[in-house]
Image (tube, rainbow, N blue to C red):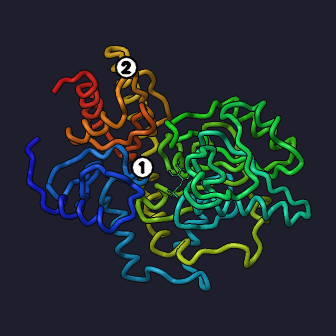
Amino acid sequence: MEKIKDETLSQIIKYDEEYYMPVFGKRVPLVADHGKGVYLYGTDGKQYMDMIGGIAVNVLGHSNPALVKAVSTQAKKVIHCCNYYYNEPQTLLAKKLVEMSFADKVFFANSGAEANEGAIKLARGYWYKKGTPKPKIITAKMSFHGRTMATIAATGQEKFSIPFGPNVPGFEYVPFNDIEAIKKAADKDTGAIMLELIQGESGVHPADAAYVKAVRKFCNDNKILLIIDEVQTGVGHTGTFFAYEQYGIKPDILTLAKGLAGGVPVGAVLASKKASTGFAPGDHGSTFGGNPLACAAGLAVINEIETKELLKNVTETGAFITEKLEKVAKSTKKISEVRGKGLLIGIELAFDSAADIKMKLFEKGFLVSAIGANVIRIAPPLILNKTQATKFVTALKNVLTGKE
Ligand SMILES: Cc1ncc(COP(=O)(O)O)c(C=O)c1O
């Protein structure tokens, strides 16, 4: 691809180093200028196939006309009003999510971490209000629940919390996909178990169906609340709107964020009627959470997913790309495993460094994420088609085999 001199890129990198906290380290050298469909364009005019979709956020792709229209129409009416008042998009989005799910009640936040904070508070509030506080929450090792103080404590990976101690107390970590470990860890103080159905941030590791069913049964038998973190798996990436639908269980509390408003920040806590009693007036809130702009975007996203039958596309294109990736694994021996569901896929490399392959794909015009030493994660927009999927797999194969 032709290299275009990009003065904006070098200027922004310089400013970023000078003015931005260095939490993202050295970033991929792309200044996002605009996007269309599954493509993102840099300020240098170069086109990238966005196979990471803002990390499972841009579910409709970039500049989806219905989403743009919903956001701009709402912006012209009212962007924000505080939660002293009612706002129509908030109420309608809550109603829609209830109609689509196990839930009876919804609360809106602004991010995944904040939704999980809400879920943790709700579970603890539930037991407190019953007069039998049960603050302990069991979570899984290698989980990821966010970057706030309670969610780094909930996350079963010490590297996220060590420098920021003391940790919020009350979390115990057990190996993922191990029901016996949960049974051993649970005690009279255990009020909730919190799990992802696919551990996205630690390498796209799906939960076993039998495990999830056994956890649900254990929670029922022992009156423990089940919190499912669908911040990454929710809003269609696995082929159903919620991943739990594929596991034959219903959670008591579920969290969403990422794709829910297609890129406008939003988070959501969904709860059964019983679990929702954990919050009484004054117990929780958020200035921005559920504001008209974010919720109008959320309504447009769900409407597009439904009317364009995007879940069907996820299932079909997901199966198609997985099969193609498995063929590459077999023919090149450069991929040791392809795992995930729908269009949330982890590609474990047999030899190569994921960071190196990510950069080589970037140079070829494809955006992916590298997790740990050797996993390439893709979570493209739900609109990805088979031709685009084939282009990506061919590029990956070429990169892995050193073919230009
Ligand atoms: C499963 C899960 N939970 C929570 C979060 C945190 O979400 P946010 O970055 O919006 O706070 C993430 C983010 O990657 C996630 O994957």
Q: Residue 391: name its quadrant.
A: top left
List x then y, in percent, for residue 88.
54, 76
Q: Is residue 165 visible?
A: yes
Indicate whether 216 appears above or below 283.
above
Residue 357 place in picture, x, y as percent:
30, 33
Q: Identify the residue at image location x=50%, y=43%.
A: 201
Q: Label 2, secondary structure: give it.
A: helix
Q: Is residue 297 left or right of residue 234?
A: left
Image quarter in which the C terminus is found: top left
- For image coordinates 50% across by 69% down, the residue present is 295
Question: Mark 2 and mark 1 in contact (Cβ < 8 Å)?
Answer: no
Name above or below for residue 392 compared with residue 282.
above
Left or right: 370 in relation to 242: left
Q: Of residues 257 and 16, which is closer to you in this image?
A: 16
Q: Is residue 34 visible?
A: no
Q: Amino acid at mark 1?
A: Ile
Identify which amino acid the numbered label 2 is placed on.
Ala
Quarter of the image with the N terminus is top left
Q: Looking at the rendered structure, which numbered label has been put on residue 55?
A: 1
At 69% from the left and 64% from the top, the residue drawn is 105
Query: Disc 1 versus disc 2: distance between alpha carbons?
Result: 24 Å
Q: Seen in the image, is 281 located left or right of residue 262?
A: right
Q: Nearer the viewer, residue 229 or 27?
A: 27
* Whole-percent x, y for residue 141 in the image: 64, 39
Task: Tell whether circle 1 marks a residue whose Cβ is less than 8 angstroms from ligand 1.
Answer: yes
Label 1 neighbour load within 10 Å: few <14, some 14-19, many 20+: many
Residue identifier under label 2: 329
Q: Is residue 183 shown above or below 237?
A: above
Q: Secondary structure at mark 1?
A: helix
Does residue 229 lie above or below 131 as drawn? above
